[in-house]
Amino acid sequence: MGAPNLRAVALIAGDSNVRGCLHFTQDTSGTTHVTGKISGLSPGFHGFHIHSFGDTTNGCNSTGPHFNPLNRVHGPPDEVERHAGDLGNIFAGPDGVAEISIKDKQIPLSGQYSILGRAVVVHGDPDDLGRGRGHKLSKSTGNAGARVGCGIIGLQSAVDPKL
C-alpha cells in the first residue's frame, strides 16, 4: 500500500521547443496516475519512459537506462515482463501536443522502488514495446530513438499552488 495522496511533478524540456509539465499522483492502492501535456513534439507516437537517474547535466543523455529494479526485459506497460519504467507511447497530434493520462502500479512515489529523483524521458520515435523482430535495441529500449525531452521527478508541495 502506498502513502495517501503523494504527489510529484516533472518539468519537461528538451530539443528545440519540447516543453511540458507532468503531475504524478499515487493513490492509496499504490497506483500512480501520470497526467499532463507536452508540446513541441513531432506528430505521432513517442516512447515514454522513467529512466534511472535524475541527472540532466548532459541533457537527457545523463538520465541513464530505463528504470529496471527487477532486471527484466523491455516490454509493454500492460505486461508483467517489462522494466518498471516502461510506460509505452504517448501520442502527439498534428499540433505537436501530447495529452498524457497513464495509470501504472510499477512507478510508486514511495517505498523501495520509488521513482522520486529519477527522470521521465520522451523519445523521438515510437516504442516497439519489445516486439521489434530481431532489432538489437528492442528488448532494452524499445528502439524508441533519441531522447527529445526529459525532466526530473520531484516531490510536489502539498500547498495549493493557486494560493
Image: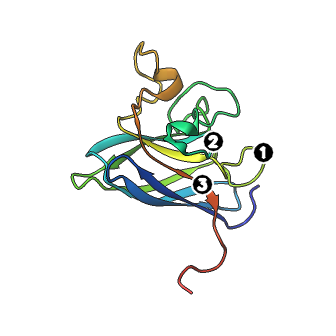
CB atoms at circles 3 and 2 under 8 Å apart? no
- Distance from Cα at disc 1 to Cα at disc 2: 15 Å
Closer to the eye: label 3 or 1: 3
**Residue 138, position in %: x, y?**
46, 22
Q: Secondary structure at mark 1?
A: loop
Which label number is shown at residue 93? none
Which label number is shown at residue 112? 1
CB atoms at circles 3 and 1 under 8 Å apart? no
Give the residue drawn at x 61%, y 33%.
Answer: 80
- Distance from Cα at disc 3 to Cα at disc 1: 16 Å
CB atoms at circles 1 and 2 under 8 Å apart? no
Q: Which residue is mark 3?
A: 153
Q: Which residue is mark 2?
A: 53
Q: Secondary structure at mark 3?
A: loop
Give the residue drawn at x 50%, y 34%.
Answer: 76
Does 72 appear above or below 44?
Answer: above
Closer to the eye: label 1 or 2: 2
Q: Residues within 10 Å of mark 2 (few under 14, many from 20)?
A: many
The reply, left or right, for residue 155 in relation to residue 129 is: right
Q: Residues within 10 Å of mark 3 (few under 14, many from 20)?
A: many
Quarter of the figure that contains the N terminus: bottom right
